[in-house]
Image (cartoon, grey):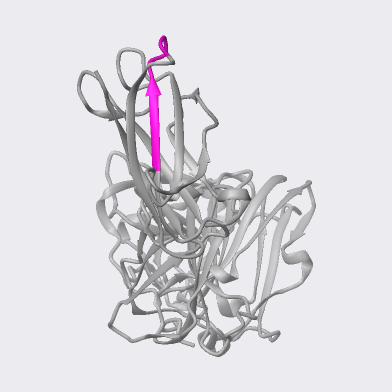
Amino acid sequence: MRLGRARLGWALALPLAVSGCIVEVEGIDPVGSDASLEGGWTIGGAPASAAACEANGITHVRVRVFDGADYADPASLVFDCADGAFDTRPNDVLRDGIWTLQLLAVDANAPAGEVVVDEGPMMSFDTLVEGGHIVIPTVDFMGEPTGTGLEGSWTIDGEPPTEARCADIGIDEVLVEITSGPGGARTLKYMCADGVFSEAVDPGDYEIRIVASNLDTGELPETEITESFSLGAGDTYIVNGGSPIDYQSGFSPLGSDAIFDAAWDIGGIIADEDVCDAVGGAEVDLLFFPADDTGRETDGVVVEMGAPCGPGVYDSGSPILAAGDYLVTAELYDATDNLISAVDLLDPVTVTAGSPLSLTFDFRLDSSTLHALLRYDDPISGTPGTCTEPTPDGVGMVTWEVFAGDRATGTLVADSGGDVACVDFVNVMSGVGGGALDPGTYELYFEGALPDTPAAKRWAGSCFLTIDDVGGLGFAICTADYMT
């Protein structure tokens, strides 16, 4: 399995300073003029002061900026401990981007390797989402545990994680995203080899999301866990029911070798917004299985979840697949996550490094269906519209009929049963006697009247719809001419 190159080593183990001065360690260059930065700290729960800082051996507080495993300690983001806070405004100090920030309490007089006295949590921020000004929540250095906490742990194939095991499975970090709770949304990051996390948090109601991540390819969606819980003062919540999250090695198609793009039809018709609406289609999921899993007996890996149905296409934009052979399934869902149709490609596809994988799918329907959008010419402009759009008063009563073949010689399949209030579409899912609609061509004929003269039909039109095969969709936009 190739999920990207693993990063070995933990950035915090790198030297921050030499005795007597604070030095700048650069692995990236986050400094720029797109966002300002603000933060604050306390010492043991009390406001920072020169005496408190000196008593705890803290001379300065600095901001460390991470981009994945790489990081920078900008010299411009070092502040006197006694200040207790900083705000760079009106000066912008960061480039646009998604940065993980951490406040470090440091002792500039300590020997190399012993400079960091205490550290705050790592939190991720997007400069655009934050509106160009990032506020780091206040960090309490040297504080006593509050007794209210969030904890969790993980294993690799049931064994404690090591750098080697994490590299083998392609996991670099475990992200704990607090999506809702006291203190607001924030993301905490832990190296895979840590195997455990423990955070002091405030009492309250929480929603969290935990997901493993690869620094080259991003989050691994198949590892996602979401939980909601309430924490009382002094309580500790342990995720995953108190058991370690066990990340399994084995099958994954995710990687950085190839772009993936797909297109789909519905019942033999190229999908667009109208075609998707005709069957209630809202989203498409694309799943990959091992090439030898012809029965789809394992859990497929969702490569794309919730691609909008209406465009009829999906394009990953950047490489997201690892080279290899896979079976692929596409699933079409409605807006309430009910499965409408699924397509299992019978033959494995081969992903080749550097070559996009392009696939097409045809979602067949449980029942062959005719769906016609009815449009009525505007008497003045001639522009087709819906029931209410023709002027001055719209369309009143409508009657319609559907024939197998054509209206002149074919068999009546369905009708409106006489005049009905104006409709903008006709949907037919069965034929004579309730039987399935056979593949073939059908003609729809319809007439409409003005609201105040229902017996005098002023609109008339017809169109042909074709069902290509079992489970097909006969679709058309039908326009009725206005007759003076």
Q: Residue 181: horizontal and vertical position, in percent? A: 63, 45
Left or right, 45 with respect to 31, comes to right
Q: Can residue 308 be spotted in the picture? A: no
Which quadrant of the figure contains the C terminus? top left
Q: Which of these two is toward me, 397 or 64?
A: 397
Q: Can residue 54 be spotted in the picture? A: yes
Task: Identify the residue shown where x is 57% and y is 75%.
Answer: 300
State the extent of the magenta-drawn residues as a range. 444-453
Q: Which of these two is toward me, 43 or 405?
A: 405
Q: Residue 238: horizontal and vertical position, in percent? A: 75, 62
446 falls in the magenta region: yes
- In the figure, residue 7 lies in which quadrant? bottom left
Q: Residue 112: horizontal and vertical position, in percent? A: 44, 77
Left or right, 350 with respect to 40, comes to left
Q: Which of these two is toward me, 244 or 86?
A: 244
Q: Which of these two is toward me, 458 or 308?
A: 458
Task: Identify the residue shown where x is 25% and y is 54%.
Answer: 32
Where 180 falls versus 285 (above or below)? Answer: above
Where 352 falls versus 223 (above or below)? Answer: below
Task: Identify the residue shown where x is 43% and y is 49%.
Answer: 410
Q: Residue 478: horizontal and vertical position, in percent? A: 34, 39
**Residue extending farthest top:** 452
296 falls in the magenta region: no
- The secondary structure making up most of the magenta span is strand
